[in-house]
Amino acid sequence: MILKQTVVASAMALALGANAVWAEGISDGKVRIGVMADMGGTYADVCGKGCVTAVEMAVKDFGGKVLDKPIEVISADDQNKPDVGSAIVSEWVAKEKIDAVGGVVASSVGLAISKVLTEAKKPLLIAAAGSTAFTTKACSPFTAHWTYDVAALANGTVNPLVAAGKKKWFFITADYEFGKALETVATDVIKKHGAEVVGGVKVPLSTTDFSSYILQAQSSGADAIAFANAGKDFINSLKAAHEFGLDKQATMVGLVVFASEVQAIDPAVIANMRLTTAFYGDMDDKTKEWAKRYKEVFGKTPGMSQAGAYSATMHYLNAVKAAGTDEGTAVMAKMKEIKPDDFFARNAVLRSDGRMVHDMYQVRVKKADERKNEDDIFEIEKTLSGDQVFLPMVETCDFAKK
Amino acid sequence: MDSFLGINPVALFGQLLVGLINGSFYALLSLGLAIIFGLLRIINFAQGALYMVGAFFAWLGLQHLGINYWLALIVVPVSVGFIGILIERILIRPISNEDHLYGLLLTYGVALVLQGIFTHLFGSSGLPYSIPETLQGGANLGFMYLPTYRAWIIVISLLVCGSTWWVIEKTKLGAYLRAGTENSRILQGFGVNVPLMITLTFGFGVALAGFAGVLAAPIYSVSPDMGANILIVVFAIVVIGGMGSIGGAILTGLLMGIIEGLTKYFYPEASTTVIFLVMVLVLLFKPAGLFGKEL
């Protein structure tokens, strides 16, 4: 233990020392931001080319230069594979002299990249990955987990439902790390508020037909069905639940739902579902202005990942400017010191563990006749303050104390 | 509720019926593959992608051309079949004398290209398609609630499978087709246009995938990779049934639907694996498949 502390302490001292020597100015005359995303796979709509566009928009809005040096954006497709992602980032660090990495959608990729970047002391600005591991067991002083995490979504969505009297829960869980973690987080919330979990099924990833599981949920007598899955699995399971009339007998609860998925489901199937989101383009003038500009460039409506990617990049560039350098340790310190504040990050702070805590929104999915256009999908019911929904800091990840 | 060994018979009935529904859907999908392999010896890996194209065409028709679900059931298979004919004529024909592996790789490439194009055009999250009004709702059977649309799937799938089987096994046209498989040169000597027959058969097999795509659109996510997931299962079914056996593909489809349904009830974690387990066992003990002829 003492040895470990010594090692950590000397590493920090070394880092600080290095900081003092190199802290001046921009390395190699450029600030390079790499955007890692899923360009053509399952998560392409969650954070793919749209995330690249969002980062580029931020750079352009910032003026294209920081401390009189040009800012460059490069991007790559990680194909949702951790080995691919970490290999590309290693190359970026070695050859491209990258200064920060943004985007990142699959948590497994994010965790692999995080290792590389922690070693290289470069900031990682996570826009779309949702695992809580980034600020718990795999936390790093160089990670800024920007948009959301699954705990915040589960908290924001489950809490009000339990309070409203949903006492018996049934889980339809995707049978892999993500689904199980989501179920654990949500179960904690359910139990903490005195409700119970009456059953659940673990469904293999990419199952097409969910009717068997819907029948099982039906016979469980649950009054709330939690979907601990995402993307196509979520869409398929919800469609089946509607078809078999499960939604007449119990409340459907999507734990991680992106706006792009809501738009992929018939309004009759998903109307009135309550969700938690970190951003909604149609919320107020500030979000509308940004969402409109984004849509002009990219052609599609932005979701929370794209908004988060923009906001994180903006904050990063502000921190580079304030720190007077693009050196990772100094920039991270500035990012945590200055409070993020833009259309996305409200009442926000980047905690010392790397969790960006900010306002989240509890929304209701609009019915078909309430929607004025294809992007008009949510009604915001409540603003949830960050402290309410994000998990408190884990002591071992409090890098300010170390 | 009475239960036996912790099994609730009422719930079990429900699972069996759901299995049968999925089975009839599998039967429909594997039928197309079985025809294409059985009669043409082409391993068509693009079948899943063409199923996806069918679902997207249904959406496009409804959204932009005013083609409703019922019309789509006719128009979409025809247009997907036409795409199939183009693929056969332009891509498969030139390599028809090569090893089967070339055809497999080629069609796999076609599948990836189609998937890429649709992801590029429509994004990865998918598109909404609702159940046609006349097929909404359902009936309470006592042991479960049966949505009308699922009942429709059983009826229409079995109807299409049955008539296809009848045409191939019992009519003169079918006899030509089968003869063409046995010895195309002799058949050609009798004045039958074998290349045209091959093209049309391929088109029909592919049209079945398009048809299944339309059937799937209201209940499953209409997304670019919807075909990739199901294709592997369907291939396993064709292998279990016996590559090329038309009746075998249909019966195995139904059987696997039921086995999968029961697995979903007793041990859900294994539900996607069970079909492959059966495949391994069948290949070990009856390599030609349950209904296949020993080579």
Image (cartoon, coloured by chain):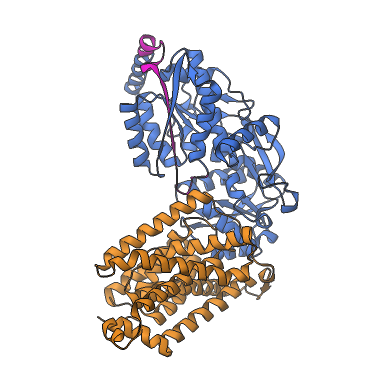
Chain colours: A blue, B orange
In the shown orientation, is residue A231 left or right of residue B94? right
Say which quadrant the C terminus of chain A sits in.
top left
Q: Quadrant of residue A199?
A: bottom right
As drawn, A287 above or below A38: above
In the shown orientation, is residue A95 left or right of residue B54? left
As drawn, A117 above or below B1: above
- Looking at the image, can residue B240 be seen? yes
As drawn, A272 above or below B198: above
Q: Quadrant of residue A210?
A: bottom right
Residue at the limit of the structure toward the right, as seen here: A369
Q: What residue span does the magenta drawing correspond to?
A: A17-45
Q: Nearer the viewer, residue B229 or B9?
A: B229
> Whole-percent x and y of residue A334?
50, 17
Q: Nearer the viewer, residue A9 or A315?
A: A315
- Looking at the image, can residue B124 be seen? no
> Whole-percent x and y of residue B125?
54, 50
Say which quadrant the N terminus of chain A sits in.
top left
Q: Determine the residue positioned at 31% across, 74% down.
A: B41
> Whole-percent x and y of residue B238?
38, 73
> Whole-percent x and y of residue B251?
43, 79
Q: Quadrant of residue A85?
A: top left
Is A355 contained in the magenta span?
A: no
Q: Determine the residue positioned at 64% across, 56% down.
A: A266
